[in-house]
């Protein structure tokens, strides 16, 4: 409808009060809904599309009619998808919803009078009008007459100053039951997950779980809150992702700025080079031209001189002929002819050739240069995606000090496909955990998308291996790499040692070894010199199968005197200082102590009390402190604990020999964890007898059953195994003693000869007993010592078999008892061994 039509209709509606009343009132009261609707549409068009004055006057006229009947509302709005009141058309809808913004603006406009609010009033439906306008409109009566609006209330806008959310409780409406619409839904059925009234529980929800709404809400609120947790987590994740995107966008802009600067710099350099070349070429052209012109000018001067001479002669002859007599001419003929002949005789036509040619040209490769310039430079995104690139190889987990470690990187693009373009920004760096050592690497391209990286670690311990492309880490980088001592040529302490067992390394690098069969302690210097002290016996400084060795914080040597069931303390030079312990199972009593170590923090001494199946803890002065463990296979229980050691955190590690595992305890003996089980595979153990832990908290376990050294982290994660049975480098035959010096060198001892004797004698069985009938007491005693070794040091099966054989022989003669125990302070019968 055009404005002209609007004005005409408006004039007809507003011409005279009487005419207006007739024309305005009657159509709206017409029985035909079509006429009513047409009248309503006319009013709607005038109010919405007429001039402001026109719309305002029409509104005033509409308000003057009093309450708007339902058919007026229908006629005005059934033609539109907006199911709103007439007053919405006048601008109320342009204001933000109060609850959507939670802020009421200082200046708002009434949708009826189009002026700032005067005593504004807010309906429950959030319609806001002036109080006077509402009185004229009689909106309250209209709302009360309509079923869907009759529960609306008037609220003073002044109550909304501040936080509008405080109004929400007062605006909550009463909810009615869906089954019984006239009943208030004050119960919640948890079975059906719906609101119900009290009538519903009589039949439909009779056997269901239900409760009052407040009580049910208290229960269900936690479900709602818990449901929000994944949302909150996703929000946090997305916020991080958005921040990452923003950071990347900023980085893109930064890289773009840098790239543009580089482009401008490169082009400036290129222009400078071209301008410099232009100046140089123009100079060459000028210089070449000037040289040619100088040469031609000299040639021209020579030609002009000859030409002048010839013309002078010509002019002289012609002038003589014209002015001189014939006699005078004849008299001068001879000299004249001679002069002419001289001039013409000196003329050589070949001298007329040009000395220079106008052959100067500019030679160039302009098309190629233009093409090069057109292809000069390139703005590109690197096709390789660092986060997709995969790294493999042993070098991402473990490496040996002084040995080249290798890893390989598979270059992939963002789609996970092989990146065939050369990656020249790939680099690798190995960094020690304390940052003290940084090792660079070399990178070689093996094939189109595989790159080999090698590095040479120099320091043992835990490191971080960073693999970067375009300074971005590859997948899973950095990697935690444990650098181990070099096992290529370990130090085997053998030579003239007799059944070496326990081993320790002193500060100066000297190796202290317990020689079991020689019943002595030997100190071997760095140049191989050996010094021994101690003899067989039970007195001070004497030993009966010394096994465990430890160096305390004062430099003294602690020895686990296996056969004498005691601990001896010696000075650094071998002088006896102190002896503690006797045979037994009480405090400060031992049954075949084997391993021994000194706690680096507390100075306390931990002793593997093997046949008592426990760890005894002594104070630094070797007085009793505590003990932990008992026989068994559960956590914290032992079956022949053979060695004990400590890590950098002070935790205590025990080699549980016949449980084939390593158990870890706190400094106070509280069980923490264990690792290993019987077997030959990775991370499996077979008769672990010795533990050593280096400064990098790497755990080394000597396995007699598997003839190897297995290496673990302090978390029990398997790292590597070294060695196999044999006599060559990094080969073992029943390794026993194990120690690591300050440089990370691994020292080992082997006890294969002694074990071979045990296995041989145990296989002979009853034949051994014939030796006890020999007339020589020396042979009888030797046989007793052999039996003692088999019962105490053999496997449980071996010891039990020998015990059964001994018992099957009946009563033992006195000389057997004497032969077995005269070399020891233990006054026991052979059968006592069965308790072990």
Image (cartoon, rainbow, N blue to C red):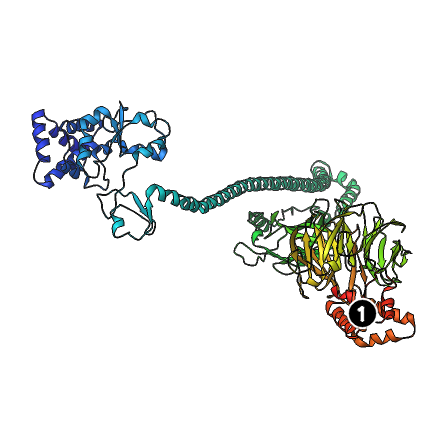
Badge 1 crowding class, 10 Å Cα cut-off, few under 14, some 14 to 19, many 20 or more, is many
Residue at horizontal 68 percent and vertical 53 percent from the top: 664
Residue that badge 1 annotates? 758
Left or right, residue 834 beside residue 818: left
Total marks shown come to: 1
Which of the image's four quarters has the N terminus? Answer: top left
Q: Nearer the viewer, residue 164 or 370?
A: 164
The answer to whether residue 453 shows anywhere in this view is no
Locate residue 581 relative to residue 357 in the image: left or right: right
In the picture, which quadrant includes the C terminus? bottom right
Point 21% across, 41% down: residue: 80
Q: Closer to the camera, 267 or 463?
A: 463
Residue 30 image position (x, y, % from top left): 8, 37
The residue nearer to you, when weighing 153 against 662, is 662
Q: Is residue 245 left or right of residue 209?
A: right
Instruction: Look at 79% across and 55% down and name the residue there.
Output: 739
Which of the 4 image quadrants contains residue 343? Answer: top right
Q: Is residue 134 above or below residue 273?
A: above
Where disc 1 sits, the SS reads helix
Mark yes or no: residue 418 visible: yes
Q: x%, y% of residue 174? A: 27, 39
Point 87% across, 75% down: residue: 773
509 or 274: nearer the eye? 509
């Amino acid at each position: 409808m055009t404005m002209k039509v609007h004005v005409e209709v408006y004039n007809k509606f507003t011409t005279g009060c009487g005419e207006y009343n007739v024309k305005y009132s009657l159509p709206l009261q017409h029985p035909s809904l079509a006429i009513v609707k047409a009248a309503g549409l006319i009013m709607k068009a005038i109010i919405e599309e007429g001039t402001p004055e026109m719309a305002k006057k029409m509104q005033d006229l509409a308000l003057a009619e009093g309450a708007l009947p339902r058919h007026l509302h229908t006629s005005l709005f059934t033609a539109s998808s907006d199911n709103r009141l007439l007053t919405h058309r006048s601008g109320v809808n342009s204001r933000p919803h109060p609850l959507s913004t939670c802020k009421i603006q200082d200046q708002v406009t009434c949708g009826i009078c189009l002026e700032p609010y005067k005593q504004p009033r807010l309906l429950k439906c959030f319609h806001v009008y002036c109080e006077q306008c509402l009185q004229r409109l009689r909106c309250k009566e209209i709302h009360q007459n309509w079923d869907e609006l009759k529960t609306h209330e008037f609220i003073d806008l002044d109550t909304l100053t501040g936080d509008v959310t405080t109004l929400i409780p007062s605006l909550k409406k009463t909810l009615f039951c869906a089954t019984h619409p006239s009943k208030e839904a004050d119960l919640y059925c948890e079975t059906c997950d719906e609101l119900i009234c009290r009538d519903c529980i009589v039949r439909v929800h009779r056997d269901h779980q239900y409760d009052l709404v407040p009580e049910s809400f208290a229960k269900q609120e936690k479900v709602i809150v818990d449901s929000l947790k994944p949302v909150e987590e996703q929000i946090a994740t997305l916020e991080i992702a958005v921040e990452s995107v923003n950071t990347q966008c900023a980085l893109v802009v930064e890289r773009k700025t840098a790239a543009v600067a580089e482009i401008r710099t490169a082009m400036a350099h290129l222009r400078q080079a071209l301008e410099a070349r232009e100046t140089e070429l123009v100079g060459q052209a000028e210089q070449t031209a000037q040289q040619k012109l100088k040469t031609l000018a000299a040639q021209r001067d020579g030609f002009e001189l000859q030409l002048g001479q010839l013309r002078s002669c010509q002019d002289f002859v012609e002038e003589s002929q014209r002015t001189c007599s014939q006699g005078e001419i004849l008299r001068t003929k001879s000299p004249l002819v001679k002069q002419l002949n001289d001039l013409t005789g000196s003329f050589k036509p070949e001298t007329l050739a040009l000395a220079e040619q106008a052959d100067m040209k500019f030679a160039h490769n302009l098309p190629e240069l233009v093409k090069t310039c057109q292809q000069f430079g390139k703005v590109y995104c690197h096709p390789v995606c660092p986060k997709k690139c995969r790294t493999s190889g042993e070098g991402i987990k473990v490496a040996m000090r002084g040995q080249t470690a290798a890893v390989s990187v598979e270059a992939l693009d963002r789609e996970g496909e092989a990146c065939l373009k050369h990656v020249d920004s790939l680099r690798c760096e190995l960094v020690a955990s304390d940052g003290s050592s940084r090792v660079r690497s070399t990178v070689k391209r093996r094939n189109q998308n595989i790159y080999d990286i090698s590095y040479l670690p120099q320091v043992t311990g835990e490191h971080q291996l960073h693999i970067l492309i375009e300074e971005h880490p590859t997948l899973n980088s950095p990697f935690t790499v444990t650098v181990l001592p070099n096992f290529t040529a370990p130090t085997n302490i053998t030579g003239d040692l007799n059944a070496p067992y326990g081993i320790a390394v002193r500060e100066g690098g000297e190796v202290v070894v317990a020689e079991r069969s020689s019943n002595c302690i030997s100190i071997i210097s760095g140049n191989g010199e050996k010094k021994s002290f101690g003899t067989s016996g039970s007195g001070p400084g004497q030993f009966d199968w010394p096994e465990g060795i430890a160096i305390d914080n004062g430099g003294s040597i602690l020895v686990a005197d296996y056969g004498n069931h005691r601990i001896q303390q010696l000075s650094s030079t071998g002088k006896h200082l102190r002896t503690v312990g006797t045979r037994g199972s009480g405090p400060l009593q031992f049954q075949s102590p084997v391993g021994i170590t000194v706690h680096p923090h507390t100075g306390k001494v931990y002793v593997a009390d093997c046949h008592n199946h426990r760890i005894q803890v002594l104070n630094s002065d070797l007085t009793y402190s505590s003990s932990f463990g008992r026989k068994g296979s559960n956590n914290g229980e032992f079956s022949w604990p053979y060695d004990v050691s400590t890590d950098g955190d002070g935790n205590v590690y025990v080699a549980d020999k016949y449980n084939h595992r390593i158990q870890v305890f706190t400094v106070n003996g509280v069980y923490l964890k264990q690792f290993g089980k019987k077997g030959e595979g990775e991370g499996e153990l077979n008769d672990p007898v010795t533990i050593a832990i280096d400064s990098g908290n790497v755990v080394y376990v000597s396995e007699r059953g598997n003839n190897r050294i297995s290496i673990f982290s302090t978390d029990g994660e398997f790292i590597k195994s070294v060695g196999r049975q044999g006599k060559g480098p990094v080969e073992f035959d029943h390794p026993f003693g194990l120690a690591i010096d300050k440089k990370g060198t691994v020292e080992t001892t082997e006890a294969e000869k002694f074990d071979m004797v045990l296995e041989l004698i145990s296989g002979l069985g009853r034949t051994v007993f014939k030796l006890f009938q020999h007339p020589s007491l020396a042979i009888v005693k030797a046989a007793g010592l052999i039996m003692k070794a088999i019962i105490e040091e053999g496997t449980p099966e071996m010891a039990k078999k020998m015990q059964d054989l001994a018992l099957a022989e009946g009563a033992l003669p006195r000389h057997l008892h004497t032969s077995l125990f005269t070399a020891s302070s233990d006054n026991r019968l052979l059968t006592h061994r069965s308790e072990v």
